[in-house]
Amino acid sequence: MAVHGLASLGTLDQVIRTFHREYAKTPAKLKFVYCLLVGSFPFNAFLAGFFCSVGAFVLTVSLRMQIEAADASGKPEVAYRDYAIAMIILFLAALNYVG
């Protein structure tokens, strides 16, 4: 059963337009359902990794500033202990943020 004539072109055009319109809605719906079921894990992992890197950099710079201070009023052991505790808290916070 073959369809001939200009009427089939109008129908084909309608089918293509309807398909495109419905397809444009589908990815947003799928992403919404995915976020409801799974969560926004990839984005949270990116944020946790980024902030963990920045936090480790800031803590390391702080440690270096404390150890190489001109007055040397503090003990290096205390600075290392504070650095280790702060890094553990930072890593636990990043791990908790990932999920």
Image (spheres, grey):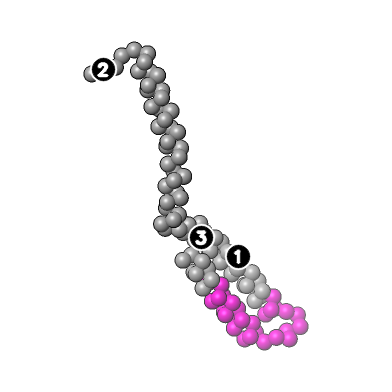
Can you say whether 47 is above or below 20 in the image?
A: below
Residue range in magenta is 65-91
Answer above or below: position of 14 versus 83. above
Label 1 or label 2, whichever comes before in sequence order:
2
Residue 38 picture location, percent across and down = 42, 58
Q: Which mark is residue 54?
A: 1
Dot 3 alpha-carbon crowd within 10 angstroms: few under 14, some 14 to 19, many 20 or more: some
Most extreme residue toward the left is 1
Labels 3 and 1 touching (C-beta < 8 A): no
Distance of label 3 from label 1 (alpha carbons): 15 Å
Q: Amino acid at mark 2?
A: Ala
The mark found on residue 44 in the picture is 3
Q: Which residue is mark 2?
A: 2
Decide: marks 3, 2 in contact (CB < 8 A)? no
Mark 2 burial class by Cα count in 10 Å: few <14, some 14-19, many 20+: few
Res 53 → quadrant: bottom right
Q: Earlier in the sequence, mark 3 or mark 1?
A: 3
